[in-house]
Image (spheres, grey):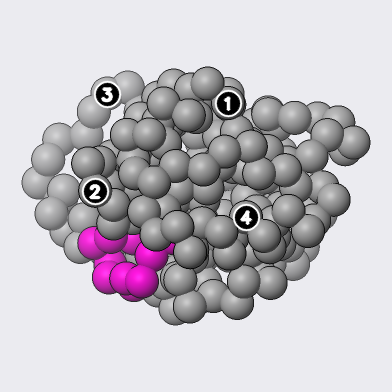
Amino acid sequence: MTESGEARTSASEPIRVLIVDDHELIRRSLALALAAEPDIEVVGEASDGQEAVELADRLMPDVALMDVRMPRQDGIEAAKGIKASVPSTRIIMLTVSDEEEDLFEAIKAGATGYLLKDVQINDVPAAVRGVHEGQSLINPAMAAKLISEFQNMSRKESERPPQLPVPRLTDREMEVLRLVAKGLNNREIAKQLFISENTVKNHVRNILDKLQLHSRMEAVVYAVRERMLEIT
């Protein structure tokens, strides 16, 4: 399932969350913060990436909060495993690192959000709701880093022949994709293009369907790699 279809459609069903971190204190803090929310249910906890993949396959969470650095299997590899077995799960990476490489690898692995561990614990429930609703969760500073990494990738790929066939997006879909690449959310894109937020969601859904991808940022990575999109 891609972002074009929600894992859960009933508003009465709580958002099922899997917490993954090798530090028990962090897991407990996150679990307590989320358990206080009536629309969120913590369905499991894992202390490493390997355990996370096994639990996700069994529990089918809507959202996974995942540490990047963990023993046995790190969060990047675990994200790939979870997206392979439960593609509807939205993944938020939790890390102390704001390095461009970690951010880029997380997005390529299928992560929808990227939170630094100094985030206020009270902000985590809103982050979970946001990614569950299909938003990409990257703060402006990290979006700038991501754009920088896209630029580097674009330069490295400049001599590689594009893979054929490349799906064709409409002019409006390309406009939306360019703004996604700049880190704008649906509301901001709607305001800039003078269209409704629902129309933006429809364009994003069409983009993902055409490219057969799971997330907005995966679509940007693909578009840059195939030279459909140039990041300036």
Disc 2 marks a residue whose amino acid type is: Pro
72 and 6: which one is in front?
72
Earlier in the chain: of badge 4 and badge 3, it is 4
Disc 3 marks a residue whose amino acid type is: Leu
Q: In this figure, which residue is indicated by the disc labeled 4?
A: 31
Q: Residues within 10 Å of mark 2 (few under 14, many from 20)?
A: few
Q: Which residues are magenta?
A: 94-104
Real-space Cα separation, disc 2 to disc 3, in angstroms: 39 Å
Side of 134 relative to 175 (left or right): right
Q: Residues within 10 Å of mark 4 (few under 14, many from 20)?
A: some
Q: Do callouts 1 and 3 mark residues in contact (Cβ within 8 Å)?
A: no
The image shows residue 60 at horizontal and vertical percentages of 58, 26
Residue beneath the point at 36% across and 71% down? 96
| Mark number displayed over residue 164 | 3
Q: Do callouts 4 and 3 mark residues in contact (Cβ within 8 Å)?
A: no
Please, what secondary structure does the residue beneath circle 4 have?
helix
Q: In this figure, which residue is indicated by the disc labeled 1?
A: 59
Q: In this figure, which residue is indicated by the disc labeled 2?
A: 71
Q: Residues within 10 Å of mark 3 (few under 14, many from 20)?
A: few
Q: Do callouts 1 and 2 mark residues in contact (Cβ within 8 Å)?
A: no
